[in-house]
Image: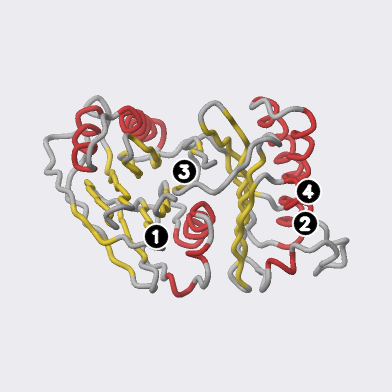
Amino acid sequence: MSYDVVPDAGHWYRVESGSAASAVRRAAERLGGQLGLGENRVAELAIVAAELTSNLVKHAQEGVLLLRPARTGDVAGVELIAIDSGPGMADLTVSSRDGHSTTGTLGIGLGAIARQASWYDAWSRPGRGTVFAVQVWAKEVRATPAWSAGLTRPITGEQVSGDTHAMRTEQGRHQVLVCDGLGHGPLANVAAEAAVSAFRTAPAGPPATVVAHLHRAMSHTRGAALAVAELDPAAGLLRYAGLGNIAGTVLAPDGTRRGLVSLPGIAGHQRPTVREYDYPFPAGATLVMQSDGVVERWRSEDYPGLTGRAPVVVAATLLRDAGIRRDDACVLVARTPS
């Protein structure tokens, strides 16, 4: 089962003390209860939250955690994404074994997370830090990583982001959206949410047709830069149509990268030119889309093994290292659906 994480429904926590860790645990318990996980599963969710935040407090530098709901159809779960900037681990497999410790503690944290989680994945490198993504669903739900995942973070000082993302499968078309509402704050968020709503209900069609539909649907907003990509496994292609400063990159299995073309324009304003471009997208390729709150200077060779991790782990790592605080930021990562 794959999942569709509700965009911008989560909350970021800076975890640098025991009191912050306790706040995250309580928030996770509340969210699990609201989503109907059941008393026993909520208790197990609390263990996951406690262990993740304990690791951030004890071992991490600049530790943050994103807590958000995950949904597939009528089923809901909780996703926690812990991110830090160091010191990192050379071997996550060893570090996840019960009894392994670098600080003289019992060393059962990562092992406990693995036992309670429905699904988890991580990436770490010494000197660069660690990203750990965990999902907790009802016991009967079998979770697997989604073919696409994204993260957003608002500009410092704002509670909502003008950047957002979405994914959909409509009549066999696997499509993703990244949107950057003009400016920041609530009005930018309104524009971004209008784009997501129109994207989810748009008639099935290629990316250029969907972008034109979003443009018409957003005429009542301040407008946005946005891009829609479609992954076509049968043809081995990626179809892409963008307006404004949304950057798209295809990472080939051999490590080479290719930038994608977006045209000038603002969705919702005037009449922009919308064109669609096709790119090779072989099995094992990775799509990365980002708003202008994420710099493009990251290099895949600096992250050995990262493209083999789940899309949400890749997105979180790039947001950590390439996201800027003076703007809203969004990263989306997608791979060919299985």
Q: Which residue is mark 3?
A: 154
Upstream in the sequence, badge 4 or badge 2? 4
Helix, strand, or loop for circle 3?
Answer: loop
Tally of marks: 4
**Type of amino acid at the residue the image marks with label 1:** Thr
Looking at the rendered structure, the kind of residue marked 3 is Pro
Task: Write the residue at 33% across / 68% down.
Answer: 257
What secondary structure is found at the residue carrying circle 1? strand
- Looking at the image, which residue is at 41% across and 52% down? 334
Above-or-below relation of 64 to 85: above
Q: Residue 234: x and y, percent?
A: 30, 52
Callout 2 crowding tier (Cα within 10 Å): few <14, some 14–19, many ≥20? some
Q: Mark 4, residues whose alpha carbon is within 10 Å: few (<14), some, or many (≥20)?
A: some
Q: Which residue is mark 1?
A: 286
Between marks 2 and 3, how big is the CA–CA gap? 32 Å
User: What residue is rendered at 61% in x and 56% in y?
Assistant: 121
- Residue bearing mark 2: 111
Callout 2: helix, strand or loop? helix
In this rendering, position of residue 224 left or right of residue 323: left
Q: Position of residue 192 (x, y in %)?
A: 35, 35
